[in-house]
Structure formats: C-alpha cells, structure tokens
Image (cartoon, helix red, strand yellow):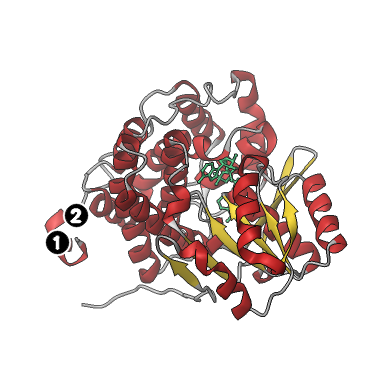
Amino acid sequence: MTSTETFIYEALPMRVRFGPGQLAELPEEVARLGLRRLLVLSTPEQHELAERVAGLLGHHAAGVFAGARMHVPATTSAAACEHARRVGADGCVAVGGGSTIGLGKAIALETGLPVVAVPTTYSGSEMTPIWGITDNNRKRTGRDPAVLPRSVLYDPELTLGLPPSLSGTSGINAIAHAVEAIYAPDASPIITLLAQEGVRCLAAALPAIAADPADRDARSLALRGSWLCGACLGATTMSLHHKLCHVLGGTFDLPHAPTHAVVLPHVAAFNLPAAPAAHNALCQALGTDDPAQALADLGTAVGAPRTLADLGLRDTDLPQVIDQVLAQPYANPRTPTRDDLETLLRAALDGSAPANRDRAIVRAAPIDAYTDLQR
Ligand code: NAD
C-alpha cells in the first residue's frame, strides 16, 4: 500500500508540571528559570488566589495585578505593563483562565518578560504562542514564540472552584481546539493522537463534573484533556469555528467559552462532511457516528447555553459577523458562502439542530478498527 500523506510537525518547547497540589512547587519552578521578582496576575474575581500565590513566592513576589479582563483590552495590557515596570518585575505568574494568561502574554509581547502559567480553566491558552489584544472593539491576534509560557503548572485542585457552568463551556472550548486541529492545514498524525485523547478525556470528564464539581478524578481528567487540546491549538492553524468565535467575542463581546460551546456543533456539522478523516477520528474519540450531534448532546449534558441569542447576539448583528468572517481568508475544509454562514449562524442564534449535514459524504470507520487507540 502506498501513502500520499505529507506533513510538517514542529514541537514547541513546553515544560509542564501536572498533579494535585503542584501549586506548592511554584517557587521551585520559578527558581529553575532564574526568576526573582514576579508579578502575579489574576482577574479581580481571583484576587484572593493571586495573593495566596504571592504569599507562596515570598520575597520573590513583586506584587499582584488583579485587573485581567476577557479578551485583553489594550488599556488593561498597558496598565499591567506599567505596573510590571514600576515594581521591577523580571517575570509574571499568570494564575487563572485564558483572560489572565492572555494578559501575561500581552505583557510578554510588549516587554519581553517571561510568563509562568498556572491555569485554572480549560482554555488551553497556556500551551500556545498565540496572543490577542482588543482595541476599539477589534481583537488583534498573532503568534510569537516570546509569549509562550516558559513553564506551565497544572494543579487540578485549583479547578475545583470553577463553577459547573463554566467548567462545561470551558471544556467544550478545549474540545473545539482539538476538532479544528484534526482538519487543520498543518495537521499531523501526532496532533490527531493528542486531539483524540484530549476529546476523549473531556467528553468523559465534563458530564461527571456537571454531576459533581468536587469529583477530583474528573477534574484531573478534564485538565489533562485541556492540556492536550491546548497543545493542538498551539501546533496548528484554526479554521471557521475559531474565526466565528473570534468575531463574536471581539466585536460583540460575547463570552468566550459559552460562545464556543454554542457554535461548535454547527461548525462541525458544516465542516466534517468535507473532512472525512477528521470525521472518522472524532467518531472514534466520541464513540459516535455523528460527532456534531454528540457535541450538541455534550453541551446539553453540561448545561451549556444553546443559543447565541441567550448570549446577547441579535438578529441584526448577523450581517456584520458575516462581513467580518468573509473579509479575511483563513483555512477551512469547506469554503463557506454568505448563505452558508447565514444558515449556520441562524441555527446557532436560535438553537436549532446543527444544520448543513450531508450524511452521503461521510462514512464513519467502525469503532473496533481502532481498538489500539481505545483506552
Ligand atoms: P476567563 O479566564 O475569562 O475566566 C472566566 C471567569 O472565571 C473569570 O472571572 C475568572 O476569574 C474565573 N475563574 C477562572 N478559573 C476559575 C476557577 N478555577 N475557579 C473560580 N473561578 C475561576 O475564561 P477562559 O474561558 O479561561 O478564557 C477566555 C479568554 O481566553 C478569551 O479572551 C480567549 O480569547 C482567550 N483564549 C486564548 C487562547 C490562546 O491561545 N491565546 C486560547 C483559549 C482562550
């Protein structure tokens, strides 16, 4: 049998420490990096945790900046950079979700200060060199190796307080990275494996967390899944789903993780018919022959919002979303027309079943053909 498969895979230099109670190892981790004056970053809601982390760092803490906000407003980034300069920080510890880690990255972009990430959601930002800054309602993003955290400390204990609703949507946000990584133009076999395992972990863990947010095994499994899905995001180029969510978040201020949870089944239904290998990989990972419906069902199981209308989008906003999505080219298994985008967004707006499926194109591989991948 011959193969026509070609790919490029470049590993990112990531150091990860994982396990319950690992936060206690933070001083050792920053010492290993030679850092001595760390500014601890958090959102206002996680100020207390940031103070605890500063306490752990002792005299190596240069202060706390608890002003991180969703989508990294340019004004917040400027204030944090100024704060870091004022206290003579030689690095930042970002404790929190994607918003706080995003702020750490914005500081790194502006000042070159290294970031150590302590994630407390499943956003996966800690595994990527992707930064984003929002100015005048437009979110600019880019990739720069300088913003990739030098070290990531995953402690599932820190996720026990993540509210069940945000746990579910944040976990589906992570799954979205894996879904788009599998059909990415720069996908590769190692990414497919990471993505499948990440999806498997999260699809198993999220309903268990919804049932019992204090389930430590489920919390650990979900964080492992988010790590793997974040690594997929860091290694590949995202497509239509992330493009849509980027516009919805950056321009209409929709909340990041819930927006991903609503949109993902609709994009999967649109894209997977044109990406049979990705469809099959997701069938294996989710144990289904209909990944789009399985993702919608997962959203229901974790109590995620079902409609963009619930998140604040109005019917009259759709043309602007579509204009922005069509304005810039991006890789995608199918090129959506204006009508396609309108159909997809209307279904997401009012919560109808994922549309645009063309079952004739795809055929799921039998699950037992992949027993070596099953756990
Ligand atoms: P978030 O960081 O905005 O957190 C949401 C809220 O939950 C905040 O109030 C936060 O303080 C709180 N929170 C976080 N962890 C908690 C915990 N364990 N217990 C209690 N409360 C907790 O949400 P998010 O979804 O993690 O991040 C969204 C942002 O991350 C968006 O701006 C998105 O664009 C960005 N993001 C970036 C990348 C990237 O690679 N650059 C990847 C994913 C997401």
Find residue 118 and report its horizontal and vertical position in percent: 55, 59
Q: Where residue 354 sits: x, y (%)?
A: 37, 31
In this rendering, the answer to whether 149 lies above or below 183 is: below
Q: Amino acid at mark 2?
A: Ala
Toward the viewer: 220 or 61? 61
Residue at 39% in and 23% down:
352
Q: Amino acid at mark 1?
A: Ala
Q: Which structural element holds mark 2?
A: loop
Other-residue count near label 2 (Cα within 10 Å), few / some / many at <14 / 14–19 / ≥20: some
Toward the left, the furthest residue is 368
Where does the C terminus fall, quadrant-wise?
Answer: bottom left
Q: In the shown orientation, is residue 307 left or right of residue 247?
A: left
Residue 336's place in the image compared with 109, above or below, is above
Left or right of residue 313: residue 241:
left
Residue 307 in view, yes or no: yes
| Quarter of the figure with residue 85 | bottom right
Tag 1's secondary structure?
Answer: helix
Q: Which residue is mark 2?
A: 365
Quarter of the picture containing the N terminus is: bottom left
